[in-house]
Amino acid sequence: MPERTVVLGSAQGLHARPAKIFVQEAARRPVPVFIRVGDRAPVPAGGLLGVLSLGAGPGAEVILSAEGEGADAVLDELAALLARDLDAEPDTAPDADPGAAAGAAP
């Protein structure tokens, strides 16, 4: 099973916001993806609670693994995502409601 090791680029580590972005991207991939920190057991990358349970802080090294056709390309894409500062990027989540953020009534 191919793996990629990546140092988290988000200044606060893999907390709620960057984890949400990562999980949504991982869940869209056509192959199962797993993430782990150190020698801890891997968790599915498409599950927010599992990813948050890793407690990956600023500068942590995480290991991504995937299996199936296209796994290498998927790992490259997700590793590049985690290497960025996801705290500095706008929330592009498909379920984000811009009106709710502005306090607008439905």
Image (cartoon, rainbow, N blue to C red):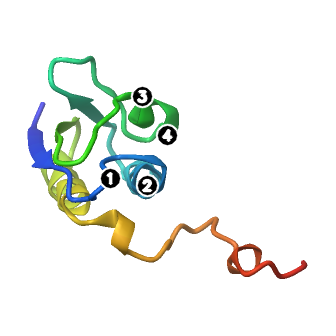
Secondary-structure class at tag 2? loop
Would you call the spot at circle 1 few (<14 residues within 10 Å), some (14-19), or many (20 or more)? some
**Which residue type carries mark 1?**
Gln
Q: How far is the residue under mark 3 from the one under mark 1? A: 15 Å
User: Between tags 1 and 4, which lies in front?
Assistant: 1
Q: Earlier in the sequence, mark 2 or mark 4?
A: 2
**Which residue type carries mark 3?**
Ser
**Residue tagged 3:** 53
**Which residue type carries mark 2?**
Arg
**Which residue type carries mark 4?**
Leu
Q: Position of residue 48 (x, y in %)?
A: 49, 40
46 vs 74: above or below = above
Q: Which of marks 3 and 1 is nearer the N terminus?
A: 1
> Which label sits on residue 28?
2
What residue lies at 49% left-to-right and 73% top-to-bottom? Answer: 92
User: Between tags 3 and 1, which lies in front?
Assistant: 1
**Residue tagged 1:** 12
Judged left or right of residue 72, residue 69 is right
Secondary-structure class at tag 3? helix
Q: How far is the residue under mark 2 from the one under mark 4? A: 13 Å
Q: How far is the residue under mark 2 from the one under mark 1? A: 24 Å
Q: Are marks 2 and 3 in contact (CB under 8 Å)?
A: no
Secondary-structure class at tag 1? loop
Number of disc labels: 4
Would you call the spot at circle 4 few (<14 residues within 10 Å), some (14-19), or many (20 or more)? some
Q: Position of residue 75 (x, y in %)?
A: 18, 50
Q: How far is the residue under mark 4 from the one under mark 3? A: 9 Å
Would you call the spot at circle 2 few (<14 residues within 10 Å), some (14-19), or many (20 or more)? few
Q: Position of residue 24 (x, y in %)?
A: 47, 54
Q: Which of marks 2 and 1 is nearer the N terminus?
A: 1
